[in-house]
Image: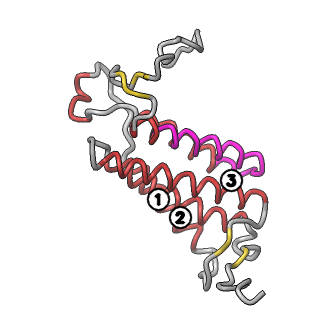
Amino acid sequence: MVVLSKIYTKTGDAGETALGNGARVAKHSLRVSAYGTVDETNAFVGVARQHSDGEMDAALQRIQNDLFDLGADLCRPDMERDHEAGYVPLRILARQVERLESEIDVMNSRLQPLRSFILPGGSPLAAQLHVCRTVCRRAERMTVELATMEEVNPEAVKYLNRLSDWFFVVGRIANDDGRADVLWVPGLTRES
């Protein structure tokens, strides 16, 4: 259980922060940047939720909870030492990735296949979901880079990869099941 009785601690004033295992690292470290970008994705999902309701809003709330799980996973290095923590550290699991895949398959089955790339936009919700998708891709790139230098839960990388696809498909759903998608017209302004 998290208890936040004091919000500022002054422990980061010198440009360092504590990871989930207590180690102190620079705030600009790649690990902190990766989970910080996961947090940024979560904040953008919160903005998207201002335009959603019903089943869509419930799905976005689940994603927000998963993103906190993912941040907790990424902020705790040394997976091989999880047993020393005194508690079970939170890690993204394969079943969370599989849930995203299942949801993508169900949503995508109601959409017409794309014959062109789509431009981010359409409805306010769809436009915001495209922002979520692109920030999620940035978090994925950072996490993949981090994984070349330090141990990272492979399911965390998979989750980010599927989540950006999930945002793409749900963005199409938010555009009247793709009927209001804005299609890219290659070279449209070249002759203007």
Q: In the rendered view, tell whether residue 79 sits above or below residue 84.
A: below
Residue at (67% x, 79% y) in the render: 184
Q: Residue 128 has which mark?
A: none
Mark 3 and mark 2 lie on one chain; the one further toward the N terminus is 3
Given contact means CB atoms under 8 Å apart, are the residues at marks 1 and 3 in contact? no
Mark 2 and mark 1 lie on one chain; the one further toward the N terminus is 2
Q: Residue 104 has which mark?
A: 2
Identify the main secondary structure in magenta.
helix
> Is 40 on the left-hand or right-hand side of 26?
right
Which amino acid type is marked by label 1? Arg
Q: Position of residue 189 (x, y in %)?
A: 74, 83
Q: Position of residue 143 (x, y in %)?
A: 39, 48
Q: Which residue is mark 3?
A: 55
In the figure, residue 44 lies in which quadrant?
top right
In the figure, residue 83 lies in which quadrant?
top left
Region in magenta: 35-58
- Whether the magenta-drawn stretch holds residue 5 is answered as no
Mark 1 and mark 3 lie on one chain; the one further toward the N terminus is 3
User: For the residue labelled by badge 3, is the local secondary structure a helix, a strand or a loop?
Assistant: helix
Given contact means CB atoms under 8 Å apart, are the residues at marks 2 and 1 in contact? yes
Q: Position of residue 54 (x, y in %)?
A: 73, 51
